[in-house]
């Protein structure tokens, strides 16, 4: 203990430099560092002799230790393309501490005698920044920034709008260096007009907190959109589309920029399947707005319809959507900045789902047919505010507040085999969060940060099923309806402090924090009988309180040796205090445990283009609240769910090995990785399925499970052909367990192969083509015997032909083979004709979708004991006339 105290004392005192007459600071221009600027010290203002001299480093930082004691000096800074600047320091003998002297340089006007215009390269790479020239990749079909990003080598846009660069999710989406959108950046990427974009920059080794520069190994990525000058004072676009079957698509965006303010407003209304918002209520894919706050948000148990499809939204998403977002950033001064995000979302989604499921369980075979006509009406109101204050060059604080309110009205008419039922679900969700954090840069080699966060989330649900299901044994009266009530509440409090210390090639981080999470669930199921009686039972009730407290201390150390190899180690020490109280069954469970969770990473640079990365982590995870309630909850018109509660920890070992090759000059990227997860225990399902109902019980088993995956990612851009080739593939093995209809514990293996290939090419500025091919196959094995197998194939082809400078034609085909074992395939055909007058402020288009007029889409899904053939309706063929205006 004494040695530990001495070590901490030494670390603390070495964080400070006590040097007399040391002058240091930063040279910058418009908040950007000026590297390699000359810093000269003279004894008198008019002296031509140089007393001392140094240069700034690449971060714009300099430091000079005076050779002799002086009471008055002149400090001069010179840099190419900037005006020289001189500052006078007097009476410096009175101050024996370090003197901070920063310089903000002004541009130096230069008169050019001759200007030579050369063709700009499509991609330029300088240090950690890759700059794209959009004009080299456009084909005329792009309307918003997201359309452009999909065509830039190295950048990928996921289905939920998430942007990745070289396979890594971006941390920030910036406009001229400013973070206007926070985590909801799809508001910008899906709505900002591509005509406002001058350049696109992908910034690697990005550090969100600039005050920690040099103290952490920044591994994040950011996208910075450079806006066209002269178009950004007040600019935007508006378009209106209308066509047969009363189809419409209306949108307006506006961007306002000056030295102090950036503002972006977008409003859209459509019924052709588009979603311009950062929210998603029509699929199981986690939207970015949900992903960023996943740990603080609570769960919901009652289902609200299935809207997922492997097709694009424009074919299957039958909606009537209104969305409006306002994002505003204002700089009150060079130190104080405020950001506001306001959003409104309203939609009406409809779908008809049909399914035919064949079950084969324990030598028993039966069939369940389901039909459901769905109407889902989500409404959302969102407000964020962020205030940051850079008190001085070494201290900054930030406050973030958020309020999010959602309402979802779900109505459906279902047919469970031959039983007709009406489903009505009302869900509200109210989420608030308060976050205060600060950073204090102690000196060049150390800093401290602190965070205090509080969030509160409540999500009540009411489910009315008519006619209902009989839940009382022996009662022969008809059940008029069921009332299922369910409400999860979650309260989170977190505080954390971090100390950073730089030791030349090594970086140290000490962390200490406290986390408290309080979950409650109240639920009850009632049956209303024809004789007027109402029945419920403790078997169908929950009053659960689940709380855990978590103080933790962690030590992180990273080391890099001459850019040749490096390693990072995190030792996380956590003490859990868990309490689970079930008031209905009068059960109380407690668990206290010390958990040690290490994370290790090793990186070896093979050469300037390739490196090898290996990681290992071990973690013990607290059980999630949706696995701890014991009373049954009616989650759908034929489905019940409950658990066998157990508050034991989930133990997980994770291994990863990744080889990365990146040739920036040839714009070639290749990576291959192997991943393995091994869990010594896990939650498994006990399913009881009959013609009327499905009961699912989740239970913890010490047997555990494991999975393996192998991934390939290749991309090559060939500028002389203006061609990009992307190949992605993965093979996954998963070893799981389950119990079905009183069977023994079954060993289930699944094998999944996925291959995707994308080719984009341009020919003499006349033709642009893109072909996207994907193939997947999955096998389910029970005791090493194949039970079900399923393969699918999809090919999308797009072609743009420039008929003349002001007229372009776009053709798109989509061949889909949902099940290669059957002869059911689909062809989707789209066509667009776009006319842009020479002034480019107006654009007119004729848009045709689903010309082959597919009215429904059928697909297949399998498990180890079932095969389901499901279908849903589609947006039928329509034609739109469109006009747009840019200002």
Image: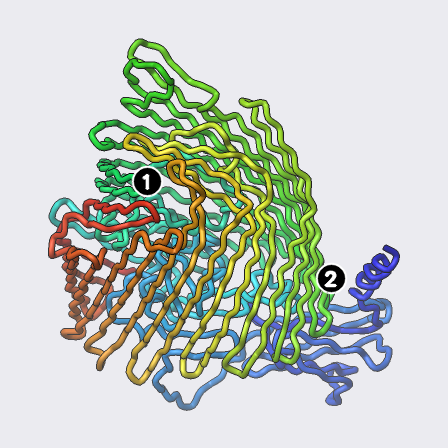
Q: Is residue 207 left or right of residue 9?
A: left
Q: Position of residue 67 (x, y in %)?
A: 83, 82
Work out whether 196 lies above or below 65.
above
Secondary structure of residue under mark 1 = strand
* Residue at (19% x, 45% y) in the render: 873
Dot 2: what SS? strand
**Total number of numbered discs in the rendering:** 2
Q: Look at mark 2 in the image and give the residue it sits on.
A: 442
Q: Residue at x 41, y 49 (%)?
A: 286
Q: Quote the CA–CA distance across marks 2 and 1.
A: 48 Å
Give the residue furthest to the right: 2
Does residue 873 sit above or below 239 in this rendering?
A: above
**What numbered label is drawn on residue 27?**
none
Q: Which residue is mark 1?
A: 346
Image quadrant where one finds the N terminus: bottom right
The reply to whether residue 444 is visible in this rendering is: no
Find the residue positioned furthest to the top: 531
Residue 562 horizontal side relative to residue 270, left or right: right
322 and 105: which is toward the camera = 322
Q: Residues within 10 Å of mark 2 (few under 14, many from 20)?
A: some
Color scheme of the displayed model? rainbow
Front one among 89 and 790: 790
Residue 298 on image: x %, y %: 49, 39
Image quarter hosting the C terminus = bottom left
Residue closer to the observer: 192 or 746:
746
Q: Is residue 113 visible?
A: yes
Pointer 2 or 1: first along the chain: 1
- Residue 204 on image: x %, y %: 51, 70
Q: Residue shown at 62%/28% (left/top)?
A: 588
Q: Residue furthest front?
A: 363
């Amino acid at each position: 203990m004494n040695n530990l105290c001495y070590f901490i004392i030494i670390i603390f005192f070495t964080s400070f430099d006590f040097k007399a007459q040391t002058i240091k600071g930063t040279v910058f221009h418009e908040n950007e560092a000026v590297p390699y600027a000359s810093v000269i010290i003279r004894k008198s203002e008019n002296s031509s002799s140089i007393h001392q001299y140094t240069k700034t480093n690449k971060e714009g930082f300099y430091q000079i230790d005076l050779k002799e004691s002086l009471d008055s000096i002149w400090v001069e800074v010179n840099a190419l393309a900037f005006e020289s600047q001189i500052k006078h320091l007097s009476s410096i003998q009175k101050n024996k501490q370090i003197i901070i002297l920063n310089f903000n340089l002004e541009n130096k006007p230069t008169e050019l005698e001759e200007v030579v215009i050369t063709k700009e390269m499509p991609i330029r790479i300088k240090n950690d920044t890759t700059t794209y020239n959009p004009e080299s990749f456009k084909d005329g079909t792009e309307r918003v920034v997201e359309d452009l990003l999909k065509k830039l080598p190295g950048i990928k846009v996921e289905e939920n709008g998430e942007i990745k660069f070289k396979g890594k999710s971006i941390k920030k989406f910036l406009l001229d260096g400013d973070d206007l959108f926070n985590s909801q950046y799809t508001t910008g990427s899906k709505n900002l007009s591509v005509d406002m974009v001058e350049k696109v920059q992908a910034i690697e080794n990005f550090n969100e907190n600039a005050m920690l520069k040099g103290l952490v190994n920044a591994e994040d990525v950011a996208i910075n959109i450079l806006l066209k000058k002269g178009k950004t004072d007040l600019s935007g676009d508006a378009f209106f589309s209308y066509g047969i079957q009363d189809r419409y698509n209306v949108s307006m965006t506006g961007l306002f920029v000056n030295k102090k303010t950036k503002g972006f407003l977008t409003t859209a209304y459509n019924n052709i399947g588009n979603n311009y918002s950062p929210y998603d209520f029509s699929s199981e894919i986690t939207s970015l707005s949900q992903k960023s706050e996943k740990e603080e948000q609570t769960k919901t148990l009652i289902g609200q319809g299935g809207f997922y499809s492997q097709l694009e939204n424009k074919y299957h998403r039958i909606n009537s959507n209104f969305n409006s977002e306002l994002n505003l950033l204002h700089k009150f001064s060079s130190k104080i900045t405020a950001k506001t995000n306001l959003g409104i979302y309203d939609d009406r989604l409809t779908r008809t789902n049909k399914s035919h499921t064949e079950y084969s369980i324990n030598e028993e075979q039966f069939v369940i047919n389901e039909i459901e006509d769905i109407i889902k009406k989500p409404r959302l109101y969102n407000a964020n505010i962020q205030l940051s204050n850079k008190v001085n060059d070494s201290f900054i604080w930030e406050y973030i507040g958020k309020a999010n309110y959602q309402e979802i009205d779900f109505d459906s008419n279902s047919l469970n085999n031959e039983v007709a039922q009406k489903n009505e679900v009302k869900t509200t969700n109210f989420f608030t969060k308060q976050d205060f954090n600060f950073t204090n840069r102690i000196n060049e080699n150390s800093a401290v940060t602190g965070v205090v966060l509080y969030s509160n989330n409540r999500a009540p649900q009411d489910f009315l099923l008519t006619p209902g299901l009989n839940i009382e044994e022996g009662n022969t009266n008809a059940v008029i309806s069921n009332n299922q009530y369910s409400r999860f509440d979650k309260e989170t409090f977190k505080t954390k402090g971090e100390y950073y210390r730089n030791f030349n090639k090594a970086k140290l981080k000490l962390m200490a924090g406290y986390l408290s999470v309080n979950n409650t669930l109240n639920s009850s199921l009632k049956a209303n009988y024809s004789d007027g009686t109402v029945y419920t039972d403790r078997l169908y009730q929950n009053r659960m309180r689940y709380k855990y407290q978590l103080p933790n201390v962690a030590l992180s150390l990273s080391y890099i040796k001459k850019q040749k190899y490096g390693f990072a180690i995190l030792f996380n020490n956590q003490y859990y205090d868990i309490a689970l109280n079930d008031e209905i069954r009068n059960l109380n469970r407690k668990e206290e445990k010390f958990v040690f969770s290490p994370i290790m990473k090793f990186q070896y640079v093979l050469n300037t283009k390739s490196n090898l990365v290996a990681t290992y982590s071990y973690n013990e995870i607290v059980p999630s609240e949706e696995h701890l309630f014991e009373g049954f909850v009616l989650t759908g018109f034929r489905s019940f769910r409950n658990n066998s509660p157990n508050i034991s920890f989930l133990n997980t070992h994770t291994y990863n090995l990744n080889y990365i090759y990146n040739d920036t000059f040839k714009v070639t990227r290749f990576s291959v990785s192997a991943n393995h997860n091994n869990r010594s225990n896990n939650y498994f399902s006990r399913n009881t399925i009959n013609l009327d109902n499905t009961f699912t019980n989740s239970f913890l088993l010490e047997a555990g499970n494991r999975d393996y995956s192998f991934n390939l990612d290749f991309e090559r851009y060939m500028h002389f052909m203006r061609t990009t080739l992307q190949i992605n593939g993965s093979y996954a093995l998963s070893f799981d367990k389950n119990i079905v209809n009183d069977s023994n514990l079954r060993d289930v293996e699944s094998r999944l192969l996925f291959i995707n290939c994308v080719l984009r090419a341009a020919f003499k500025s006349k033709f642009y083509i893109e072909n996207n091919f994907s193939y997947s196959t999955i096998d389910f094995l029970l005791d090493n015997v194949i039970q079900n197998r399923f393969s699918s194939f999809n090919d999308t082809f797009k072609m743009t032909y420039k008929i003349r400078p002001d007229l372009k034609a776009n053709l798109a085909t989509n061949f889909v083979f949902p099940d290669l074992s059957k002869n059911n395939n689909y062809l989707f055909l789209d066509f667009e004709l776009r006319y842009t007058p020479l002034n480019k402020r107006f654009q007119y288009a004729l848009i045709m979708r689903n010309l082959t007029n597919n009215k429904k889409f059928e697909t297949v899904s399998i498990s180890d004991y079932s095969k389901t053939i499901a279908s849903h309706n589609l947006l039928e063929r329509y034609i739109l006339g469109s006009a747009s205006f840019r200002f």
